[in-house]
Amino acid sequence: MTSLAQDLTGAGMIRDSMREGLTAEMFADLASVEALWRAMETAPDALATPYQRFDWVASFVSGLQAQDRLRVLVLRDAAGRPAALLPLLMSRMRGLAVARVVGAKHANYHMPLYASRQAAGSSAEEVEAALVRAGRAAGIDAYALDHQPRFWDGIANPLGAKGAPCASDAYGLMLGPDAEATVKRAFSGDARKKLRAKERKLVEALGPIDYVQASTPESIAAILDAFYEQKRTRFAAMGIANPYADDDVRRFIVAATAPGVPHPAIELHALIAKNDGRVLATFAGAVNDNRFSGMWTSFDPDPEIGRFSPGDLLLHHLIGQQTSAGRRAFDLGVGEARYKSSICDETIELVEVLIPVTASGHLFSLAADTASRLKRRIKRSPRLWQAVSRLRKLRHS
């Protein structure tokens, strides 16, 4: 790994020597690839999730202070045109070099950024072979590429063709051109009636309320402070560790929601009581021009506030707001939940992809596949999942 970093620092990239098919370049810093990356993600025919936007990845990497572990893989077609880009973080596991897509559990999707729908038409074998060749040159033992959508915007993801199902899928909603019609499609007439009644009673109890998209330093700080406290209380009650207490994660969130950026990597929304500024619920999502992808939601833990369902009120408003903003899709991320299945009209099937490069990488991939299958069996069995949840509570009690 050290020799790779030195080579990349001096030469800027590694290109394989294939004359046909996909060729690979590996970059070791964001500055070297920024112009290419931004051009790819803004191309009119690009196929990408919000989590592979340059700004989202840059925020994540800077927050984790992991610039030295970053590798950005660019695949080019036979004519030399960029076809796909995959941001990776290197890690050492039992002495092996393992490459994973940037984002960890904070990214719902780890799909490559494809320059066009045509570029996404590469075969699984072509893409895998290019990754293996690049891995050999870069000293990578194996790729562990989880949360790969099998399809994205109706287009097959080459990396998803041979993967094993993830423990959980994700859930999405296609947004129409009319906000009111979209909200009516997502929420039944009875659900909308109940939410209107709860909103009316909430106003009677607390005074005027406001739906806010944070854009100033003051509003971002206030909403994040409330979010951290609401999550701290929630995770404590569940008896599990709070991932948002981590300083690296908070640095990432601050970078991704920074004010003054025309198109922040993460949009931050909240339901707020106007009289005292109390934050009743929050919702944040990774965004690009076409999609809002939910990353987290939180709500005030006070039972007196909870009876008004502030989280549901905010979600109801947000779907209409995102439709009006011109986005075509809205998703609620990975994991099963009643509110997701009742609102969403799309199940986004996710797979895990393990690509060994070396003999040691093959052994790692076998072990990782066994662990993934066990996790999938537990998550998809209510009885086993309840047992694991009880053990987690005992461990953190």
Image (tube, rainbow, N blue to C red):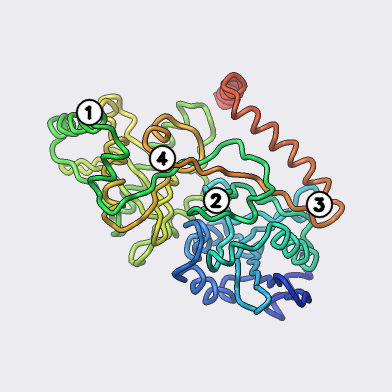
Whether residue 232 sits left or right of residue 78 in the image: it is: left
The foreground one among 174 and 245 is 174
Quadrant of res 227: top left
**What amino acid type should be assigned to the residue bearing mark 3?**
Gly
- Rendered residue at 56%/64% (across/down): 114
Q: CA distance from mark 3 to mark 1?
A: 54 Å
Q: Nearer the viewer, mark 3 or mark 2?
A: 2
Query: Looking at the image, do the residues carrying marks 3 and 1 touch, with CB atoms under 8 Å apart?
Result: no
Q: CA distance from mark 1 to mark 4?
A: 21 Å
Whether residue 275 sits left or right of residue 290 in the image: it is: left
Residue at the disc numbered 4: 345
Per the image, label 1 sits on a secondary structure element best described as helix
The disc placed on residue 361 is: 3
Count neighbours of disc 3 (C-alpha within 10 A) and say few if under 14, some if 14 to 19, many if 20 or more. many
Q: CA distance from mark 2 to mark 4?
A: 15 Å
Query: Looking at the image, do the residues carrying marks 2 and 4 touch, with CB atoms under 8 Å apart?
Result: no
The foreground one among 212 and 234 is 212
Q: Earlier in the sequence, mark 1 or mark 4?
A: 1
Query: Looking at the image, do the residues carrying marks 2 and 1 touch, with CB atoms under 8 Å apart?
Result: no
**What amino acid type should be assigned to the residue bearing mark 1?**
Lys
**What amino acid type should be assigned to the residue bearing mark 4?**
Asp
Residue at the disc numbered 1: 194
Per the image, label 2 sits on a secondary structure element best described as strand
The disc placed on residue 151 is: 2
Query: Looking at the image, do the residues carrying marks 4 and 3 touch, with CB atoms under 8 Å apart?
Result: no
